[in-house]
Amino acid sequence: MQPDPDTTLVAFIGPRHLAGGGDPAWITVPLHRACGWSYGHDPLMPRVILSSPNQKALLRLEPDPEGQWWTIHHNATQDRPAWYASFGARTPVEIIAGFTDALTAPAAATTAPADPYEPLERAGWSPTGTADGFLSPDGRAMVQRTGSAGDGPWFATVALPGLWQAQFDEHTPPHLIAAFTAALADSRPVPRTGSPLRFLTLYPNLVTRIQRDVPAAQVASVLEERVRALAARRAAPPTHPSAPRRPPPNSGRSR
């Protein structure tokens, strides 16, 4: 049977932390078109560099076989030192987007700090027995904060060879890390198209994959819908006063 040219085979994969990287345009296109981040084009360099409208944040997407492919650096502000976050090449773009969408939200500058562990607790993740952190239900992903008093950098790690790790330094705003953990703990599968990823072939029993033909026009429209939604978010008037800042929660809890 010949494939239908008007449909695309889409695999919906769960848990999402094992879905692979996905299309980087899910992050870069909305940052530029919906959030006003600017870029410099160099056709001879295999990288993307985007800077925020206020020039305080810089995102780099650069193939690096020895390190993280995605990095975000933010300059110091009046109430916070400079900070950075980074993500490995196979970090699902939907999870990174949780972080970047919170970073670019109009209320991000005044959002009260949040507890990054809270979304994991709500999603049924379990406290780790030997460290300050939480483990996913499948036992493959862990989020933890290091430091003697639970005041050091944050790490999210997937325990498969060469999969991915996300890193946040100790000055990264907690509400941004909480947005990342909420996207990480989201139980909804994520769509992938194209050839099966290598690790799905190596570890077929670790993921649930539902494949179906989806109208090609629908597949093509998803990114445009995301861009429109984020652009509308910038244009919408605030619906409530900004929440006052509170001291960040004590992450050195006993678990």
Image (cartoon, grey):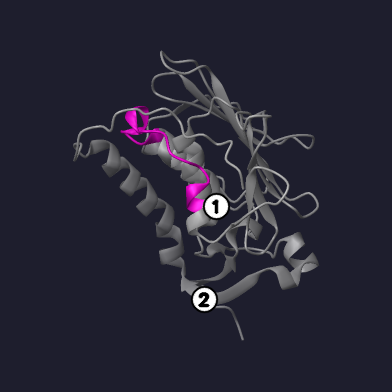
Q: Nearer the viewer, residue 136 or 74?
A: 136
Q: Are marks 2 and 1 in contact (CB under 8 Å)?
A: no
What amino acid is found at the position of numbered circle 1 in the picture? Leu
Is residue 182 covered in magenta?
no
The disc, 2 or 1, on the residue closer to the chain's N-terminal end is 1
| Image quadrant assignment for residue 68 | top right
* Residue closest to the eye, 102 or 111: 111
Considering the image in quadrants, where does the N terminus appear?
A: bottom right
Q: Secondary structure at mark 1?
A: helix
Q: Give the residue type that dot 2 points to.
A: Asp
Q: Position of residue 53 (x, y in %)?
A: 39, 23
Residue 102 falls left or right of residue 237: right
Residue 184 is marked as 1
User: What percent of the width, then of the height, locates residue 228?
Assistant: 32, 47
137 up-or-down from 227: above or below: below
In the image, is residue 57 above or below residue 47?
Answer: above
Q: Nearer the viewer, mark 2 or mark 1?
A: 1
Residue range in magenta is 104-119
**Is residue 119 shown above or below 16?**
above
Residue of label 2: 213
Image spot of residue 117 (x, y percent) = 53, 46
What residue is shown at x 75% (from left), y 53% (from top)?
A: 159
Left or right, 20 with reference to 204: left
Q: Residues within 10 Å of mark 1 (few under 14, many from 20)?
A: many
Give how far apart the Cα atoms at labels 2 and 1 are. 26 Å
Residue 51 appears in the figure: yes
Locate residue 96: give its quadrant: top right
Secondary structure of residue under mark 2: strand
Residue 106 image offset from top left, x and y in percent: 31, 33
